Image (tube, helix red, strand yellow):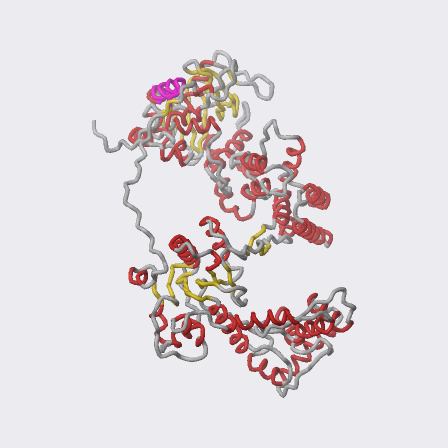
Amino acid sequence: MHHLLAGWRTVRCGSSPLTDWASPTADNSRIAERLHDLQRLQDSADFAMPDDLRVILEITRKRPSPLKTISVIISQHVGYLDEWQKALLQHLRRDSRASAGQLEELVAAYDGQVAASAARSGSTLRAVQDHLFTENVTEYPGESSFSIAGVRDAWESVDVTLTAIQHRLKADPALRPNDFGILLVGGSNTENQLHRVAARYSLPIANAERSVTIPDYGAEAIKLALMGWSDLIPITAAKSLLTNPLMPWSDAVGRELAASLDDRRWGLRFSRELPRSVRSFAEFLLTGLEVQTLPDALHRLIETLDVTQDEHCAARTREVAANVLNAFTSGIRDWDDLITQVSVGARHERLADPVYQDGITILREGHLPWRPVRHLFVLDFVDGHFPTVTGLPQIFSISEWTEIVKGGLRIELPRDSAQRARQVFKSQLKAASDSVTILIPRRDTLGKRVEASSSLYDIAALFGDANDAESLIHELETETGRKHMPQIPAAVPPVGRAPRMVEPKDLRLQQNLLRLNCGEGDPQRPLSPSAMDKMLVSPVGWLLAQLGAEPGLWEPEDFSPGLTGSAAHAVFETLFPVDRRPTVAVIRERTRPLFVAALKRLSPYLLAPQFRIEREYQIGQIQRAAERWLQILETLDASVIEPEIWLQGTWQKLPIHGQADAVIDIPDAGLVIVDFKNSSHKKYFARMESGMDLQASMYRTMMETGAPKPRRGTAVVLPENRPLCGILYFTLRDGTVSADFQPAVSMRDWRSTSVDVAEHASKALKARVRDATRGCVRIPRKSELDAWADNGVPMFAIDASPLTQRLLIDDSGDKA
């Protein structure tokens, strides 16, 4: 349809608007049939004439009385005008009663200036200005008034051009910025880059225009809100929705809301300072809804979005909302189908700054020069430009268009368009009086090789050999090429200097770091086992966590160890309640729905169809682990005393707390603290054997020095007179127990050790705590971390931030 409408416009504008339809004579039956189809298209009831043509038609046919007359003088260099444009100008000229004598003199002077060559007679530039595209010159003067250089890409051509202008202005005080001109493709990435770099170089631009891309924030907000209401929104999309500029809160609040989402638990966590209205609307955006409530929800969204600053954005937002409601009204009730009704696309606008007479002159391809310059740089000199040839709609072939023109329609054929474009380019070159430098990018922005403009071969033919065009190009990447381009300043190589060596040193902050987040008189905040692990491995990482300075990365959801571990814990908590053991049949029946319910709470997007295979794998692993845990409980005749129990106590006079996954009671042994891990047993048992375990051993310390925390306001009471037997890790991936005791009953996949599993870790942690109270932050030694890692100590504290990864003392080569 696009080609059909373009064909109609071309044919219709080939004859006067005062005629209804002009059918050229054509012997070709195919041409006649197509022309008849175009006439039928125009006569159809659904046909809507383009607005610009409709206005011309009304002015030329109805002849309204002019409100104000203007003088119309048509320059001989104005370029191609179709019959409708000519008719409009002739109509305006007939209405004019003003004297155009002075204006005609100005236009005549302009035409003469455009046609005249400004360069010195006998120079290479003058030869190009006078004879390009017309005749050959036997000699190539070979001086620097006209030169061609090859550069890496369009962006380098911008840097080279502005650097050359800057150096010339510095070297010659008589030169002004308006003595220089830059010819390029208007609206290109090159022009946008030119304005950015010119601002950095403090070089003024006379007639600056730049393209800006304005995101479709309204459509994006609606699309992401639909995903949020469907309960299947990726976490990165949810963060994008909360930080959308149209939201009724500040950027800082949006970032705070986005940061509260993590991959371990779905849901927003609000600070106390946030107003109730913000909390309510944020929860509304990310809460699943029944599809029947969509009209009301969409109305609330549109009324709340802040679109008052941009009328186009407001109209676009209403348009997208209307499309969704129309789809809903037509019977679409599937969230995915409703989401597909929204297409998000940025709009592009060109912004023009006021003309600054003293700035660098910008000439654009296809436009006649608006003022002369002394030195002209030509950018974007690649295939398809200088000249740019405009084609005709593909509804007819070139030979058929030629026959149509012979039949009476006045249409510009591609060969005529090319000739006109060449003359415009030639006029642009004539605007320079002293020099022209053409810069040819060898590659595009993606690194793909591009060919030079076809005019390069015309320039080569001008001086004798079109087949040797490449010899005219001086590559600025080579020393030889730079020698032939004295007007392009060579970069001064920097003086070699050894890089500054960063030597990490321990920090001394002169305050008790354990009380960073405590007010005066407030009690010490308790440490958790994971915080102790972090302090042990990387005191810097622990300090960043205390300060809230860890990087808030936006990462897509996946079945990470943390998330799958949280989901598995939720399944085990329900399958193994207090004092009851499930049957194998119950485990196999309930594992899947419990896992799905946990995912819905933790990361609902992972319930999408594309994650089915990974979900099935996780469900199978958790089910096998649950059956294995049931065997262990039955073999030990153990019962669950408390699942997911919060413990608290003291260590080295410091308050500590943490959540153990379960406490079980073995009749002939006592109470055992259990920690489920979604991995294999090797690193956990290695940690226990080497005396470097902190997590489970700290749970033991809490049991020995304190008591369980209340659960939802109700005290948790453990059996009296039952000794604490030990601690164990149960790893779900291989169904293995790693414990610090050996049960009376022998069983497979039970690993035990009799050593103090926290002996060495406690000693190292005491030193870290002592340092923290004195304000000292030790930089970890690589040799120490390597030894700990070999013994199963987790290194997640090092990977938490780029800063912790860099702040390491590499003493691996030191010898005692």
Q: Position of residue 492 (x, y in %)?
A: 32, 51
Residue 768 painted magenta:
yes
Left or right of 575, for residue 12: right
User: Does 229 appear above or below 759?
Assistant: below
Residue 364 visible to the viewer: yes
View extreme (top): residue: 721
View extreme (left): residue: 816
Q: Nearer the viewer, residue 696 or 16?
A: 16
Q: Where is the N terminus found, in terms of image quarters? A: bottom right
Residue 139 painted magenta:
no
Query: Which quadrant of the structure image shows residue 497?
Result: top left
Residue shown at the point (76%, 67%) measured from the top left: 66
User: Does 139 appear above or below 491?
Assistant: below
Q: Where is the C terminus found, in terms of image quarters? A: top left
Query: Which quadrant of the structure image shows residue 137?
Result: bottom left
Left or right of 682, for residue 270: right
Residue shown at the point (43%, 80%) measured from the top left: 135
Residue 159 visible to the viewer: no
Q: Position of residue 727 (x, y in %)?
A: 42, 22
Q: Position of residue 342 (x, y in %)?
A: 63, 52
Left or right of 90, for residue 579: left
Magenta segment boundaries in residue numbering: 761-776
Q: Main secondary structure of the magenta part?
A: helix
